[in-house]
Image: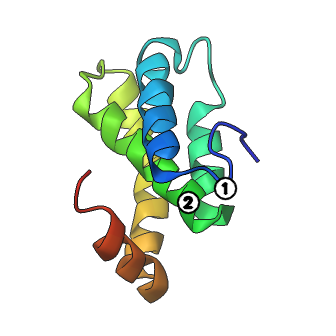
Amino acid sequence: MPTWVEPGCTQTNTDNKAYAVALIGKYDWPTHWPSLMGDVITLLRQGTDNQKDGALKVVVELMKETLDEDQLPAITSDLLPVLLEMVNDEQVSSYLDEHMDDA
């Protein structure tokens, strides 16, 4: 499991780490950080609520950044199925409704 979002992090720490990961990922993924999307997907599928929240914030921050034409298709093709699973999961969907308003 990736360690950049620990299960017990405070919300502020999670937000800060997600922003930092996204900022670094914008420049290092996929060439220098090929496991980034796999790490995000692992957290989205298997992480605690806090880890899922952090991983979603990484996705949001990556999407806010201007991704190049090579990065955008890889993000959408890898993440779309996982995000659809989450939206269809009632427990995850209600968690997102409560916690992602400020994203």
Question: At which x and y percent is residue 44?
Answer: 56, 58
| Cα–Cα span, label 2 and label 1 | 7 Å
Residue at the bottom extreme, as displayed? 90
x 57%, y 12%: residue: 31
Q: Is residue 56 above or below residue 58?
A: below
Residue type at numbered disc 1: Gly
x 71%, y 41%: residue: 2
Question: At which x and y percent is residue 80?
Answer: 40, 56
Question: At which x and y percent is residue 39?
Answer: 64, 41
Lateral position of residue 57 relative to residue 103, left or right: right
User: Badge 2 is on which residue?
Assistant: 50
Marks 2 and 1, the one that precedes in the sequence: 1
User: Badge 1 is on which residue?
Assistant: 8
x 62%, y 44%: residue: 5
Q: Nearer the viewer, residue 19 or 9?
A: 9
Residue at the right extreme, as displayed? 1
- Helix, strand or loop for disc 2: helix
Do the residues bearing badges 2 and 1 touch, measured as CB atoms within 8 Å?
Answer: yes
Lateral position of residue 55 relative to residue 73, left or right: right
